[in-house]
Image (tube, rainbow, N blue to C red):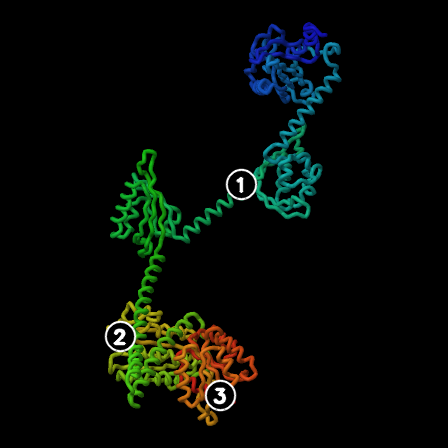
Amino acid sequence: MMKPDDYRLLFDSTPYPYLVMAPDLTVIGANAAYLKSVGRTKADIVGRYVFDAFPVNPNDPESTNVQEVKSSLEMAIATKRPHSTPCLRYAVSTDTPAGPGFVERFWRAVHTPSVDEKGEVVFVTQSSIDVTDLYTRDGLARDPSDMPGPRPEDESEVFSRAQMHEALASILKDERGHLRNLFNQAPGFVAVLTGPDHVFNMVNEAYYQLVGHRDIIGKPLRKALPEVLGQGYEELLNQVYQTGEQWQGRGMRVNLQREVDGPIVECFIDLSYQPYHGVDGSIIGIFAQGYDVTDAFEAQAARRESEERLKDGMLAAKMVVWDWDIESRKMVFSDNVEEVLGRTADSLDDLYSSVHPDDRAKMRLVHERAFAERSGYREVIRFTRPDSARQIWIDVRGKVRCDESGKPFAVRGVTLDITERVNAEEELREADRRKDEFLAMLAHELRNPLAPISSAAQLMKMVKLDETRLQQTSDIITRQIGHMTGLVDDLIDVSRVTRGLVTTEKQALDMKRIISDAVEQISPMIESKQHHLILDLAAKPARVLGDQKRLVQVITNILSNAAKYTPTGGNITLQMEVESEHVAVIITDDGIGIRPDLLPRVFELFTQAERTSDRSLGGLGVGLALVRSLVDLHGGRVLASSDGYGKGSKFVVCLPRLDKENPACDLPPLGETEDSAGRSLRVMVVDDNADAAEMLAMFLEASGHEVHTEHSARAVLNSIDRQVPDVFLLDIGLPEMDGNELARQLRQRQDTAKAVLIAVTGYGQAQDREKTRAAGFDYHFVKPVNTLELLEVLATIPTC
């Protein structure tokens, strides 16, 4: 069993150098190999703090790597595990013929803590190997001749030269492995290229992550990264290799193909090319290093895009951001202030000069209240743009900012130009007002004809009328129903036209005939007010391409408007002028005229002139709106003018003129023929409204037809087995089975397949007509039925 002296003998005789220190790093022992390696005696170092025993070289502090050694010792003591240092410089003080000095040495050390039974560190041992010879051999030592003392040659005293070389080679291998790890772990990419062809000699992991994990070591740039050719990098490498001057660039774009047949990826890099030289000073390669800044570049690009988007958004929203310093009253605005407000301002006082005088006091009160409440505010005020002198409406919003003591020191806010919104709101209010007026007027207009109709019905119910009184009562009902029908038709017309649902049947028309038909329609109204209508029509041919019914409606509406607003006995003139490209119809009157504020809106829907309590003036406000829409459909234009209230008005309709004289293709009017006169048909009227069915049946019977009524689809299908009608007049809104389904079933039956089907319904939109046509109806009439047109249709139907 070994005795303590044996361990001491082993410690002193081992060729490995050992230094023993207490946990506070006081030297408590060293073996002979260690003392020999540092050129000291035990008396020189034992009992001293290790870094006092081996002090820093004051002339070259970097030659004594105290911090690295101390950190390793502290790590070993703290973890209670051995800790190694990389090869490091640590110059050793020594006596030279010239006096005390330091000699440069290179060491590799292992620090091993010794722990007792309680787990406490008792001492720590440093095992260090002097690798200066190896570094000298690699040309790294400053001056090999300065190594202190004779080098040991006796194999019995120290390692053999072969053993030392093997040990040093192992250490150097470890050191190079350590350096290689550092090289690979570098945050930036690194590549070493050699020769004029720029052959890859070494790259780190970051470089592989940039270009892709492919076989590039030992290959020139052209073969290793072929996709880089033509992007300017080979030319830069040539320049550095030939001139020896470093090159660097930031945010360089490079397109890389990281995988075979993979996509080209756009990257951005910060890059530096540094030439390196051989022993003779010539350039032998290039050290390339840098960083992949793609993420940062894209983030910057995204930020710029975000800023541009914000800027564009602020301009689109007409919004200015600002800061106001309360004490100095200075203001700072966003860059778009001149585009939004037409000016900039250094202070609030400057800005107030553009605020409407009536709103300045209001803003001061708003500010005072916000300061007192430490809150925000919002106010809409008027503002005059200095660049155009135009008044705009701005929405000012601010948030008071307070210091740590709660005292307001600034306001941050935004200002928006809301002129368009304010104007739109005003237009909506005006439209709402006009709508309310229109609804009130429509109710009045509908009640007017209902009153005599109701009275006539009550009279017929109460007393038995003679033939004359009955005829008078019927005429009243007929006229008032016609008036109501006209009102409803106007409303439906303007709705369909303004929504683009009207189709026109255009043909070559003589404008003189259009005027003649319109005058014929309006004559009763003109005669009733004893107006003087003067016609002045050009002798030239005036042919246009248009819809006969709609163009007559245009002229009639304007003439009706003139008659309505011209006092009794007034004058109305209708002129027609024919130019090379257009035909103009000019209607003037000496009536009440049009107020200047009404003139710009005269063709808008629901616009009416001043009304009187007896409703002798005013109207539904749809006639002229319908005129403009119909003229637009014909590719023309309509204008209105007036010198003011009481000075009459003038309307001009311009329509494109046909260049060539085409023969008229007007359809002959419907009417009785010799074959159809006096013809009697079997007619079935089907309506769930018994009164409506009965009244229509009575009218048709009075016209000479044989009529039968039913009130449901089932009753119709049951009754036609007894007698098949020539004509069916079907209501669409029937219970259980609607009129369209009934029509389809009638078309499928052999006995009724060829019967004439006429829809009689309150639905008159284009889609409603399309549905009845698809169901098999021949005609579509909208309630209340125009009885004359119905008779004309029936007159064309042969009996079975």
Label 3 element class: loop
Do the residues bearing badges 3 and 1 touch, measured as CB atoms within 8 Å? no
Q: Name the residue under label 3.
A: 797
Label 2 element class: loop
Do the residues bearing badges 2 and 1 touch, measured as CB atoms within 8 Å? no
Alpha carbons under labels 2 and 3: distance apart: 45 Å
Above or below 633: residue 131:
above
In-image side of 574 versus 40 (left or right): left
**Along the line of sight, which residue is nearer the eye, 542 or 734?**
734
Label 1 element class: helix
Above or below 502: residue 126:
above
Tag 3 or tag 2, which sits nearer the N-term?
2
Rendered location of residue 608, percent (x, y) = 30, 71
Identify the residue shown where x is 32% and y is 82%.
477
In-image side of 94 versus 358 (left or right): right
Q: What residue type is labelled 1?
A: Ala
Q: Mark 1 points at which residue?
A: 296
Residue 140 figure quarter: top right
Alpha carbons under labels 2 and 1: distance apart: 76 Å
Identify the residue shown where x is 48% and y is 77%.
713
Mark 2 vs mark 1, foreground winner is 2
**Along the line of sight, which residue is nearer the eye, 16 or 746?**
746
Tag 1 or tag 2, which sits nearer the N-term?
1
Rendered location of residue 346, percent (x, y) = 32, 44
Q: Name the residue under label 2.
A: 615
In-image side of 472 versus 511 (left or right): left
